[in-house]
Amino acid sequence: MGDGRTRFSRRGLLLGGAAAGAGAAGGALAHRWAAEPAPAPGVPALNGTLTVPFHGARQAGVETPPQAHGTFVALDLEPRTGPDGVRRLMRLLSDDAARMSRGEPALADTEPELAEVPARLTTTFGFGRGLVERVDAAAVPDWLRPLPDFDHDRLDPAWGEADLLLQVCADDPVTVSHAVRMMLKDTRSFARVRWTQTGFRRAHGSQAGGTTMRNLMGQVDGTVNPAPGTGDFDRLVWGGGGPGWMEGGTSLVLRRIATHLDAWDELDRPAREAVIGRRMDNGAPLTGTEEHDEADLEATDGSGLAVIADFAHIRRARTDDPDQRIFRRGYNYDHRDSGGQDAGLLFASYQADPLRQFVPLQRRLDELDLLNEWVTAVGSAVFAVPPGCEEGGYVGQALFGG
Amino acid sequence: MGDGRTRFSRRGLLLGGAAAGAGAAGGALAHRWAAEPAPAPGVPALNGTLTVPFHGARQAGVETPPQAHGTFVALDLEPRTGPDGVRRLMRLLSDDAARMSRGEPALADTEPELAEVPARLTTTFGFGRGLVERVDAAAVPDWLRPLPDFDHDRLDPAWGEADLLLQVCADDPVTVSHAVRMMLKDTRSFARVRWTQTGFRRAHGSQAGGTTMRNLMGQVDGTVNPAPGTGDFDRLVWGGGGPGWMEGGTSLVLRRIATHLDAWDELDRPAREAVIGRRMDNGAPLTGTEEHDEADLEATDGSGLAVIADFAHIRRARTDDPDQRIFRRGYNYDHRDSGGQDAGLLFASYQADPLRQFVPLQRRLDELDLLNEWVTAVGSAVFAVPPGCEEGGYVGQALFGG
């Protein structure tokens, strides 16, 4: 489906039209807008009006081209919340998410005007082991548990496993903030927030679509991602690695990876390129010239040394097993306080089965990847991402026998 | 000047062209872009290429239409940093800011590719009392000191006065993060970070230019702002309220205002409108129909009560003295952790003289403004914003005798 999910809402078009009028009358501040090319008839002028449908066979927010802003909120169910409570919670949240994805307020929205800019808002729900067990212990996918230990991890339980995940993404940070607030109101009787992680990528329209993101270390990050809409992608992400209720779903591995930028600064450019195995300027493998060139792991230099070293990140990440690949959809994070910078990557990967796909890859990186000197996983959680739902339904419905 | 500062960089155009090519070849992910209207010749397709000149008689980032993202970083000079050190620091930072505003890397940039998306990047420098005293004690403007006490303030020194402020704004969050990191590297020998505050507004292109922002309480916020480019604005903001080196400069009052959203939720819509004195839907005063209608403070309802109550925010904020106005350019902030939401407004106001303009207004709000029940200032700092500089110069030059 990929970008096929992007639609223009009726509300969005109406708003776009009204806003264009306001702009024309808006005086000095508006004139840059007036100088921009007039949109073609039927095409909205404003990014904020773009919508991604909530309803469908698969949840939005996976194949959706990554929005600029993403907030991941993890909740733990209250002890008193039984299977019926979970079902009611998912009904409420699915309704909220569907409405807000259209640029409409949630039912109990106290600031409905803040919902008027959908900006490709998606909400993607993930179920932790605790939630599935509470509903039906026999329905837990075998991979829905903490990842095995990795030597380089320094995991803080503050960013650990939880019962329910909300991945809320949009191109507008106000939209994300408001949507999260509205949905969390509806969770209050059922669950409590365990952690929140907020990240960002390039703004909508900063760069051409399809540009691979750079992380805060400056690396082109995610070149080998399978492309939504391909058979590869369908097998790797939607391939089905769980019980029946997960048919059409996938899994999310979310790891908080701290990057030690001050230490990274001490490396010069050739050293950085050797660590990664790619050029910093365009992300090409050191044996190639373009980002998407296939790396030649056999190539040697004049002295007979491997051009892409044994310790290089891309050599360690690479596999000959076409089924060991994952789909990455991460966000940068950057917090500062008087104590210095706390920055890194909210590494989010989707795959049909984390044990068969993510774990072998991470095992190779853990064993020998020089990049481990500059990055450390400090949080890790695994979620089952159920299939999508149709209008009137709710996410996770099949788990409840409905 | 207002929007007149916005220009398209040559680099930006080149990048725009190259990126358009990459988009066309970018496969499935790119096709939404291809469906957008082709830009007119000479007009860049990408927001990320837009630039705001750093050099000029006035610093950028004041009249500049607010970018989507803003980070305010406050530093304290090291005890060993003398006048000459401050001068060298401002030379370095001015050079960094000028280069990055054009989409070029700073001289010592370790991730130069992250600088390639200027996205209207501006860096605005503010001097605290400590910095000016260190250079020339006789040159301190009389208003460059902490604001007088207000009864409702609950100030945390963690967000208090500091020697040097960097206000870094752009439409792209990666650009802001990278620019802050690069400049802070250059400050390391001279100063240490005291605090960092990061905020956001609607994304570039989410809404029509000239739309007044809404804060996270849902209020239309900033309706009565003077408009850049008008005589009013020049008098109120650039009017000159300091010593000679500040000619062409202004002052910044930055207050961190926490909003108690959970308590605000308990108010219904009519109650909220009574507290503010404006309609929630379009920001019109309760005596009018459109946002920019003049409030009628004499109007009474059928029972003889004031339509805009005594305690209403807009009545308290209003003045008949045309010189007591300020120019607001704030950002929302929203942090969450397991302890709940920490959200509010980074209230940033520019005015020629904070004692004559900001203080009387805040005094009236402090005395009687029902909104004080739901908002609390937890941080406050005042900075002198020197005039801009020309190519080859640096911000604050006149303070150092040229």
Image (cartoon, coloured by chain):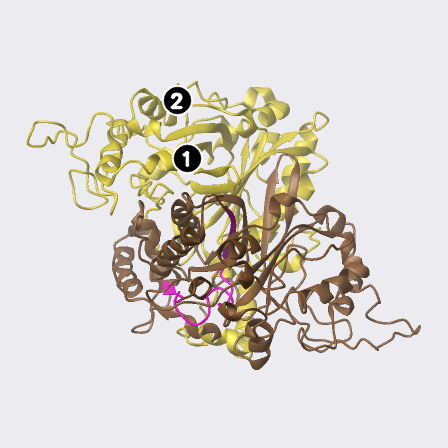
Chain colours: A yellow, B brown
Q: Find the magenta span and give its range.
A: B50-76
Label 2 crowd bin: few (<14), some (14–19), many (20+), radius 10 Å: some
2 and 1 marks in contact (CB < 8 Å): no
Secondary structure mainly formed by the magenta segment: loop
In the picture, residue B381 is in which quadrant? Answer: bottom right
| For residue B192, side relative to residue B321 (left or right) | left
Q: Amino acid at mark 2?
A: His
Is residue B239 one of those drawn in magenta? no
Residue farthest along the bottom direction in this orientation: B231
| For residue B169, side relative to residue B156 (left or right) | left
Q: Secondary structure at mark 2?
A: loop
Q: What x and y, as percent, mark residue A350?
A: 42, 35
For disc 2, the chain is A
Q: Residue at x 36, y 27 (%)?
A: A357
For disc 1, the chain is A
Q: Secondary structure at mark 1?
A: strand
Q: What x and y, as percent, mark residue A124?
A: 52, 41
Closer to viewer: mark 2 or mark 1: 2
> Foreground residue, B218 or A227?
B218
Q: Amino acid at mark 1?
A: Ser
Residue farthest along the left direction in this orientation: A302
Q: Report the Cα–Cα distance between label 2 and label 1.
A: 19 Å
Residue A349: assigned label: 1
Is residue B372 shown to the viewer in this render? yes
The mark nearer the N terminus, 2 or 1, is: 2
Label 1 crowd bin: few (<14), some (14–19), many (20+), radius 10 Å: many
Disc 2: which residue: A152
Q: What x and y, as percent, mark residue B172?
A: 43, 55
